[in-house]
Structures are given as structure tokens and as C-alpha cells.
Amino acid sequence: MLEAPALHPHAVRFAERSVAHDPIRKILVVVDPTALSHASLQKAARIASAFGGSIEIFCCMPPADLPEAWAGGTTLAAYRGVLRERQMHALERLAKPLRAHGLAVTVDCVCTAQVPEAIVAHAIRSKADLVVKDVAVQPSPAPRETTQLDWLLIRAMPVPLLLARPGAWPSHPRICVAVDPCHPGERPAALDDALIGAGSSLGRALSGVVQLVHTLQSPPHLPGEVVAPAARQEAHAHAREAVEHLAHRAGIPQQAIHYVAERIPEGILELADESGADIVVMGAGARPRVQYSAASTASLVLELSNCDLLVVKAPGFVSPILVE
């Protein structure tokens, strides 16, 4: 019989941090140095300034073959070393204005073809409290479709992952935390605590307004079955009670709870739009119903909304890259 893999020390540390609502100390910002703008850097700087934290700017460069012009005059390793040095100079240029504002900023670059795995591994090794990355833009004709890189990061990153869109946050951004304490068989109850902890930490850093949002759904039923109004009302009442209990434990007033009777992810999108959300906080992890996987739901919200997305894992989550 196979034994369950032991929790990685970072997973345990993150579980403890989520419960304690500790401040964000180390922020890893994943960038493309060739991009014209980096909203991720500006947003990470705002969070780091609030908590007195540090920033590491990180990028992955693809492995390059030795061009004919260099053949015979140098080795492949030396050529790639030159390319990495150029990338490091580009990262240093990005770090300079942040350092001028008093932030502690380091830079690093790796050469790899396994970009998602390299980013996740670096986040774990560096003990980052938060990973920030600009939303990758697909080329036309599907510019809003989630890229494979972003989807894989949503799925595998054990650290809270903030996917940032262009543009700055307002002075008091609205942060909507999507909770669902009604399906303990599909997601651990501790995930909602982690979501609220991450949303609250971000709210403190940004002087933001934190709200809880929940989509009211019909009780489970067979395909083609008609759900009686009384059964639906009972399920909705149970959901409201569970969410209000969750809010009470977290010290969030009932006025900050918003509901909509809709399917997922449409309900989350509607609530985010109605409340004018600047950031949506969602959980992601393994679910038995693959077609409704949390990673897919987060990807759809990322594709169809205009706000930033903060993806949080449950305490004890073990990244797929750590499992043999």
C-alpha cells in the first residue's frame, strides 16, 4: 500500500501562516523583462512597502543554442552565461526605481525549458509568502484565454499567487473573497480560513475593503431532476448560515457578505462585477469532479473578469512538482 507523501516543510509553514494571518514578508515577482510594462512590480511594491517586506524579481530564460557566429570561439555554457548576464542587467534596471523608494530588492534568473516547474520550485526554495505575476496575454484571436503557464501556476503553486492585470489599484481597492463552506467533501474547511487570512492581509496592506462573496446553488440532484423550490430555499438558508458563521469567526460584519443565486463561475463573476471588485480571492486545489476543478474555475474567472486574481491553496497543500 502506498503511503501518502509527507508534507513539504513549506506547506506546513504556509498552513501556520494562513491561520495566524502573518504579514507578507517575502514577495517573489515573476516578470518578462521584454514586456513594456510591469503592473506586477508596482503592485508588489505597494504590498511590500506596507509590510516592510522584500521583493525578489525573477525570470526564466529559455535555453539557447550556440549560434554559428559564436561557434569555435566559445562554449555553449559560456554563451548562455552571457545571455543570463544580459537578463540580469535587465532585471537590475527594473529593480533600480524600487530600491530608490527604499525597498529591499534582489534579482535572479534561471535558464530552463521547464518554466512552470522552475517558478514553483524557486518560490518554495525562497520561502516566498506571495508570488506576483502579470497576467500573460495570448496573441489574437483569443487574447483573454488563460495561457498554459498561468493555468499550471494556478494548479501547482503552493504559495498565494496574485495574477495582476495592467493598471494601478485605487487608494482603497475592493477585495472580494469567494468562500464556500458548504462542500466539505470537495474542499477542506480550512481553505476558507486561508482565503480570508490572505484577503485580510492584502486588505491591511492596501487599506482595502474586504468582502465575502458566495454563490448560492441548488442541492445536489440527478440530471434532469427538478429541484423543488422548498428544497432550494432550504439549501440556500443552510449556505447563508454557514457563511455567516464563517464571517463571524473572522470578525467580518454581515453587511460585507454578498450572495447571488447562480452557477459557478458565473456567480463569482456576477458578484465581482456588481461589487466593483479590484481583486478576487479564490481557492484552488484537487477536486473529485475534474470537470469542475478549482483550477479550471479560477482560470475561467481570470479569463472573463477585468480584475486581479489571488489564488490561495488550503493549508497542507502539496504541489504536484513535489510528488514523485
Image: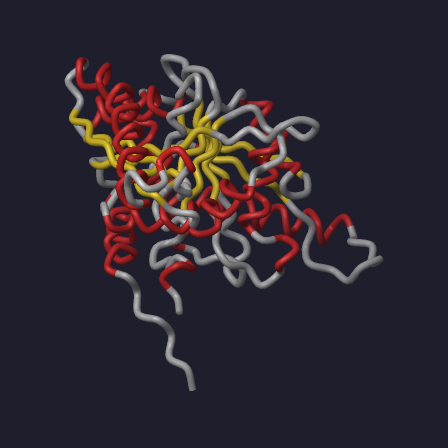
Name the quarter where the N terminus is drawn.
bottom left
From the viewer's perspective, tell me whether residue 228 is left or right of residue 236: right
Q: In the rendered view, would you say 178 is above or below 208?
A: below
Percent x, y of residue 91: 28, 26
From the viewer's perspective, tell me whether residue 228 is left or right of residue 182: right
Residue positioned 40% across, 32% down in the render: 133
Q: Which of 128 and 81 is in front in this view?
A: 81
Residue positioned 34% across, 55% down in the render: 315
Residue positioned 22% across, 40% down in the render: 22
From the viewer's perspective, tell me whether residue 232 is left or right of residue 112: right
Residue extending furthest bottom?
1
Residue positioned 39% across, 21% down in the render: 38
Residue extending furthest front?
72
Percent x, y of residue 78: 26, 41
Q: Is residue 16 visible to us here? A: yes
Percent x, y of residue 288: 58, 63
Q: Which of 39 and 239 is in front in this view?
A: 39
Name the quarter where the C terminus is drawn.
bottom left
Q: Nearer the viewer, residue 31 or 13?
A: 31
Q: Is residue 256 visible to us here? A: no
Task: Quadrant for residue 80, please give it.
Answer: top left
Q: Nearer the viewer, residue 118 or 72?
A: 72
Percent x, y of residue 195: 40, 43
From the viewer's perspective, tell me whether residue 164 is left or right of residue 294: left
